[in-house]
Amino acid sequence: MAKLWGGRFTKSTNKLVDEYTASISYDKELAKEDIEGSLAHVQMLGECGIVTPEEAKTIQRGLRAILEKVEKGEVRFSVDQEDIHMNIEKMLIDEIGPVGGKLHTGRSRNDQVATDMHLYMRNKTRELIELLENVQSALLSQAKVNVDTILPGYTHLQRAQPISFAHHLLAYFWMFERDKSRLVDSLKRINVLPLGAGALAGTTFPINRRRVAELLDFDDIYPNSLDAVSDRDFVVEALSAASLIMVHLSRLSEEMVLWSSQEFKFIELDDAFCTGSSIMPQKKNPDVSELLRGKTGRVFGHLIGLLTVLKGLPLAYNKDMQEDKEGIFDTVRTLTGALRLLAPILETMTVNSERMRHAVEKDYSNATDMADYLAKKGIPFREAHEITGKIVLFAIEHGKYLLELGLDDYKQFSQLFEEDIFEALKPEHVMRARESEGGTAPHQIERQIKLAEQKININR
Ligand code: ARG
């Protein structure tokens, strides 16, 4: 089939080259953005007298007709037209005749594709922010009903100190809050218009870039045409923000896998969000959480992939840059799928507070509080730590937990112990005593919940 750029060629393109260089199989994802950008471009061309107002109207009518077909899924894209830009331009010419060929006046595919990517990233970034907020809401509602739910807090995956389950969940809330703020911040750099940069140097036509920016609701335009067409920083930034989101999702998923195991049994995931085994009838697997964790690698891969594509490129546009697309499309799909599922999984999980409570009774995670008890009576903390360590060892040797020893036992190690040590060592007390700002005491968690609620409300 004839190429839109065929004029200078004497032979038709080798089939393998067509297939190798074409991006239509994936950049068709940009169809709507491409048309949106073209509608604004031709509007400006008409207003600036570069095409007649009638021509502009005809072209816009044609573009809208194609958009409708795209939305209904009625268009057939062709590898012969290489990418989304040329596919749509060809459809336009087929739709309205040779006047369609005026659309590409004063622009290049280089500034066009950059514009499409900016529009795409803007849409998707906003969508992701909303999806993150849904997950935050789910975490918040579980936190609200679990302020008094005690579970063992871990460091090194060893029992450390009892904490509130709400506190644990809210830790993830704040990770997602940072993720959100990274995405919000990135919008500043996404919302800048490259169109009008031409192939690399600008254009000889008297275009009005600011008008196009206004029509497409961009805050600013790139001040340098070379940078405009060469910049994919905003895609790298998105991949980097996405990688961190995946880190957070993966850590939470790992905990959900762990917590729902027979060994922990801290939570039970809803049947609707689990899968079975084809051989072991008893199995109920946390597949979604596992996949969520597993899909982290591909997102990291896409980040490294694009950084590597860009690192050696001379200015301005190079075909290598077409490799920016599959990675970010896949990343957006991966994140969207994960976030959509995570919110209902969190909302529907059953929290086994009895099991968690039981767990903190059968450990030594109140030992810090014994050391604190002595330190509050004037013993340097380091010594208090040493004494407590000896008591823990004594307890272990006698097959007992700290609360199962008697006051006489304690007094062998320090005369400062009184009857009130038993209260100080109860898991509830241990948790409630951590009143420092940002600590796990219920009163502090209530404050945290208020703060979290404000964060969600501000952004809604
Ligand atoms: N499909 C190309 C891409 O995604 C569009 C820009 C092509 N420009 C060019 N001069 N070949 O990067």
Image (cartoon, rainbow, N blue to C red):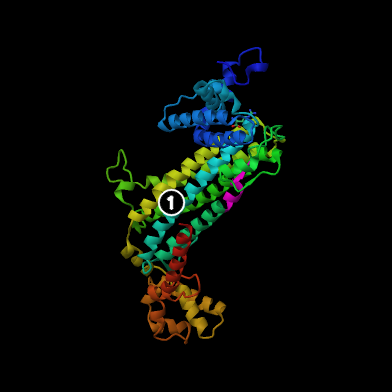
State which quadrant residue 392 falls in: bottom left
State whether residue 284 appears in this view.
Answer: no
| Residue count near mark 1 (Cα–Cα under 10 Å), binned few <14, some 14–19, many ≥20 | many
Asked if residue 369 is positioned above or below residue 284 in the image, the reply reads below
State whether residue 37 appears in this view.
Answer: yes
Asked if residue 432 is positioned above or below residue 298 in the image, the reply reads below
Residue 238: image location, x then y, percent: 56, 46
Front residue of 409 and 135 = 135
Q: Which residues are magenta?
A: 185-193
**Residue at the spot of label 1:** 253
Is 352 left or right of 393, judged from the image as shown? Answer: left
Q: How many marks?
A: 1
Residue 313: image location, x then y, percent: 70, 36
Quadrant assignment for the C terminus: bottom left
Residue 176: image location, x then y, percent: 49, 56
Main secondary structure type of the part rendered in magenta: helix
Q: Quadrant of ligand 1?
A: top right
Residue at (45%, 72%) from the top-left corner? Answer: 444
Asked if residue 444 is positioned above or below residue 232 in the image, the reply reads below
| Residue 191 lies in the magenta-colored region | yes
Front residue of 58 and 253 = 58
Q: Amino acid at mark 1?
A: Ser
| Residue 416 lies in the magenta-colored region | no
Indicate the secondary structure of the residue bearing disc 1.
helix
Residue 48: image location, x then y, percent: 64, 35
